[in-house]
Image (tube, rainbow, N blue to C red):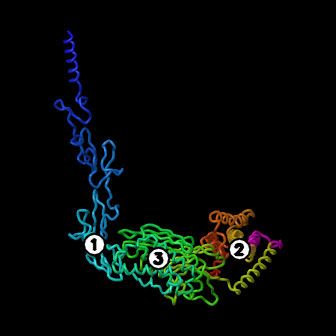
Amino acid sequence: MVGWIKLLLLALYLSAMLALPDSQKCSKGFNLKKGKCIDQDECEENYPEDMGLCGKNAYCVNTIGNFYCMCEKGFQTSEGSTNFTAESSLTCKDVNECLEENICWPNATCTNTAGSYDCVSNAGFAIKSGGNNFTLPQEPRAAVCSIDETNHCGNGTCHIGTSGPYCACQDGFTNYGNKATRCTALDCDAFKDTWDLKENVAIAHNLLTQLKRKCEDLTKGEDPEDFDDPDLLWRLLLVIDQLLLTGALNENRKVSKFLDLVESALNLIGPFIDAGRIRRSYAHTELDLLNHKGAMPPQGVAILSTKPVTLNITLETVSGDPSLYPGFASVSLLSYANLETFTDGFFSGINPQANESFVINSKVVTVSVTNTNTSHLEEPVILTFSHLTRGNGRLHLCVFWNASNGNGSWSADGCTAVESNSEFTVCSCNHLSTFAVLMALYDVEATFELQVATWVGLSLSLICLLICILTFSLIRSIQSPRTTIHLHLCISLFVAALIFLVGISRTENQNACAVIAGLLHYFFLAAFCWMCLEGVQLFRMVILVFNTNFRTLYMMTGGYGVPAAIVAISALINPKGYGTQRYCWLNVDFIWSFLGPVCVIIAINIFFFLITAWKLAQKFSSLNPDLNTLQKIK
């Protein structure tokens, strides 16, 4: 009996198993075939050909019981991976191989394509197997060389080596160890010790000897292995400090030699400094240096600064002609703490007049760039100098050190002051011939004759205006709305002339000077407003027969209220527009707050004058038709 019960239970179990669906017999990712669980190949399932199971630019990879997606070559997900699961909703996007540094050899430009890239040889170059396009590593990068060797290497010849193309430079030329770039001239005579520094400044003599040896090694094609010494730039600045400290620059000839040496040393060391920015500050020098390295010339604007000076220069100016680009571009701004004391007095290049005197009012700076053709720049360089002393009552002149003028002197050729106040001067120069730019100033005082004419003229005007004020206010028989306008016109002119005579040059206190400028602005505008009211009053007298007079309230609002509103708005917009370094008047860039309303008032007066004259001509014509045109106009 027990055996029959067991047999019945077994039969029920088998029936239940047969009734289960296939998906529950095997694990996920497997199918039941012939009683066995076989791996399901999800990658063979049918999907649209343009998408597939994994989407565009990806393919499916089957695994035991599962699958995953792989991006095709040259593609990756937004997370930077090449494999992902279909459930993650990630997609494969093109990898821009051209962002990789040095993906193509020099003399070839990278062009990104979908899933790949092309190296296109630049104009004047070709690959060894022919043609212009190639992709690494299928085509060796060493195959790119100049078709016209002279154009690429300059004073050198182009060769194909096992590790790439290279230029073999002639004597006196170098590519600073980067043999894939153009050969440029290098003058080693600048490092000769012509000052007998060996006895006076030994450290300077030793550095000059070292730089001259390194320079000669470069021009002979030897590898500059020890040029990456990080102490070399530090030693150069230390030597400059020593020369400034010892007073060795007591002649303009020595100053010219010194500036030439600094420029040559920075240009020699610059190519071996790591790309990026370097700032150094010492006792008598401060340096800001920016170095670029790469297959393509840099673009944009560089801003360098030391405490007393800021430089704005385009990187195209720094690197120069793209066809002569040596593979690096360097620009440096070097300021000296006390060089102005050695160069003060050498002003023959400015041709000063007998009554003109100059004094240096800024720190001296040297600007050095890789570009060797800086005699006439397409884009001027902009330097902003902070003044050593406040320049109240003085004009400022931007100059540079001209070594070709005798033994050297300051010259203003090619440099202009685009903006100047008591605190700083902005200079624009279209050349960097000696790479030193500074600022000179001289007093410009008004002549005694002009001052006397101003005093006498204004004094007579004040007397006459006072007589008019007394006449219009005291004699009742002539008082009318017109004389009221005349009275307030004279009052406005009298107050404006008095303030001008007393306070126009009171620039000692900037706040008081701003108040004086504001009062002058107000009363001169008030005078023009009363002139405008005079024109309107004449118009009303001619056109209207009755009720031709203004109400007093309206006249006061137009004569004093309108200029008060203009001055208040102007002061709110630009409170610093009142007062200059020489006079208590409006700044040049703020002068339209006065000229604008004046022009409007003059235009209104002209308009009313023309209408009044036309109406009078019509009136006379109706009274006497026999008058000719000329008589009507008169």
> Amino acid under label 1?
Pro
Q: Image point 52% across, 87% down: which residue?
A: 253
Q: Residue 631 appears at what percent x and percent y?
A: 64, 81
Q: Residue 628 appears at what percent x and percent y?
A: 62, 81
Q: Which mark is residue 625?
A: none
In the image: residue 495, left or right of residue 239:
right
Pointer 2 or 1: first along the chain: 1
Label 1 close to label 3 by CB (< 8 Å): no
Queried whether the magenta region covers residue 485, the answer comes back as: yes
**Range shown magenta:** 473-492
Q: For numbered disc 3, what is the local secondary structure? A: strand
Q: For numbered disc 1, what is the local secondary structure? A: strand
Queried whether the magenta region covers residue 547, the answer comes back as: no
Above or below residue 525? Residue 171 is below
> Amino acid under label 3?
Ser
Q: CA distance from mark 2 to mark 3?
A: 40 Å
Residue that carries the numbered disc 2 in the rendered image: 508
In the image: residue 294, left or right of residue 448:
left
Q: Quadrant of the N terminus?
A: top left
Q: Quadrant of the C terminus?
A: bottom right
Pointer 2 or 3: first along the chain: 3
Pointer 1 or 3: first along the chain: 1
In the image, which is nearer the foreground, mark 2 or mark 3?
Answer: 3
Q: Which mark is residue 165?
A: 1
Q: Can residue 233 be seen in the rendering of this structure?
A: yes
Q: CA distance from mark 2 to mark 1?
A: 68 Å
Label 2 close to label 3 by CB (< 8 Å): no
In front here: 626 or 258?
Answer: 258
Residue that carries the numbered disc 3 in the rendered image: 368
Q: CA distance from mark 1 to mark 3?
A: 30 Å
